[in-house]
Image: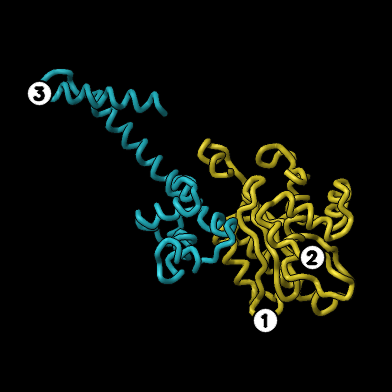
Amino acid sequence: MSNRIPGNYLRLHRRKAGLSQRELAELVGYENPWAVSRHERSLTVPPLLIALAYQEVFQVPLSAIFSGIHTTVSQVIEKNIAALNDDLGGRSGKGRSANGTAQKLEWLTQRKSKA
Amino acid sequence: MAYAAKEQGVIVRKVIAFEIRPRRFGFVVLEGLELVDWGVRGYGGKLATVGSIKKIESLLDFHQPHRIVVMDRGGRIAPTEPEKAVLQGMTALRSEASRRDIKVSRVPTNRIRGYFAKQGCGTKHEIASAIARSFEPLAWKLPPKRKPWQREPYHALMFDAAATAMTFLSERKSSVTSKAPQLGE
C-alpha cells in the first residue's frame, strides 16, 4: 500500500478492451499474468520494453497509461530544470565555459516557450 | 479522459459506488464522469458479514476514492437473515470508510427511481440499458431482459451500483465539472 504510485490506467484500458490479465501478458510477451497484475496495482514499474508494448497494444501514450508516474517524473524534472537554470544564471558570462552556458540557457528558453 | 484533466491541474474526484447483497457485491468507480472500474465480487461463498469484507478493502486500497456511495433501502423492523447480512456488510463498509476518512453517501431508492423516471426509464432493465448507453464498457455486460421466473443476472449488481452513482452525481452540482451526468452521453 505504501509503495503505490497512484494514477495508473492500465487496468482501465485492459478492461475496456475486454482482455484478461493473462491475455494482456501474452500480448506483451510475458509467460504468466503476475507481472501485469503487479503493474496494474503499481507495485512495480514495468521495464521500458514492456511499457512501450502496453502503449502499442492500447494505442494510448505512456504518459496517459502511467499518469501517476508521469506526473511525479514531470514535477521532479521541472524542479531540477529550475535548479539548473538558477545555477547557469548565476555564472559569469566570461571564461572558457561562457559559450556552453549561453547554449544551455538558450535551450532552456526554447524549452520554456514550447511548454 | 480524466487523466487529461489531471495533467491540466484539475482535481478529479473519484467516487466508488457499491451495491451490497448477502453473497456478493457490485461496484463501479467513476473518476469525474468517466467510468474507470466496474465489476461484481463474491465473498468466497460467505455472507456479507464483518469478516468477509476483505474484497471491499482491497478495492478501497486500489482506488483510494474520495467518496463511497451506497443505495439506502431503509430499514425494516424485523429484517430477514439475508437483510441482516447486508446490514452487517454496510456497517463494516462504513467503519472501514471511517477508518480511512472517506465520506459515505447514502442515496435512497426512491431518489434513484425518480432520477431515472425523469429520463423515461421505469424498469430495472430500462435503467440498465440507459446506463449501458452512458458507459460504453458496461454495454458488453448488459444482461438480457429477465423473465419473472428467472433469477437476477450476475452482472445486474454493477448496473444498480452505477444507477446509485449517477443519481448521486446528478444531485451534486458542484461535483467535478459542475456538469450533471446525462444519460446517453
Mark sitting earlier along the chain (2/1) = 1
Q: Residue at x 83, y 60 (%)?
A: B125
In the image, residue B7 sits, relative to residue A18, either above or below, namely above
Tag 3: residue type?
A: Arg
Rendering quarter of residue A31 = bottom left
Q: Residue at x 73, y 59 (%)?
A: B161
Badge 2 and badge 1 both on one subunit: yes
Kindly identify which chain the residue marked by label 3 belongs to: A
Residue B179 falls left or right of residue A65: right
Return the residue at label 2.
B144
The image position of residue B16, as x and y in percent, is: 66, 56
Query: In the depicted view, which residue is nearer to us: A63 or B79?
Result: A63
Tag 1: residue type?
A: Gly
Give the number of the mark in front: 2 or 1: 2
Chain ID for yellow: B
Tag 2: residue type?
A: Pro
Tell me the CA gap for discs 3 and 1: 76 Å
Residue A31 falls left or right of residue B117: left
The image position of residue B148, as x and y in percent, is: 89, 72
Q: Residue at x 42, y 61 (%)?
A: A28
Badge 3 and badge 2 both on one subunit: no
Q: How would you rate the neighbour count of disc 1 (Cα within 10 Å): few for under 14, some for 14-19, many for 20 or more?
A: few
Residue B63 falls left or right of residue A34: right
In the image, residue B135 sits, relative to residue B74, either above or below, namely above
Return the residue at label 3.
A96
Return the residue at label 1.
B45
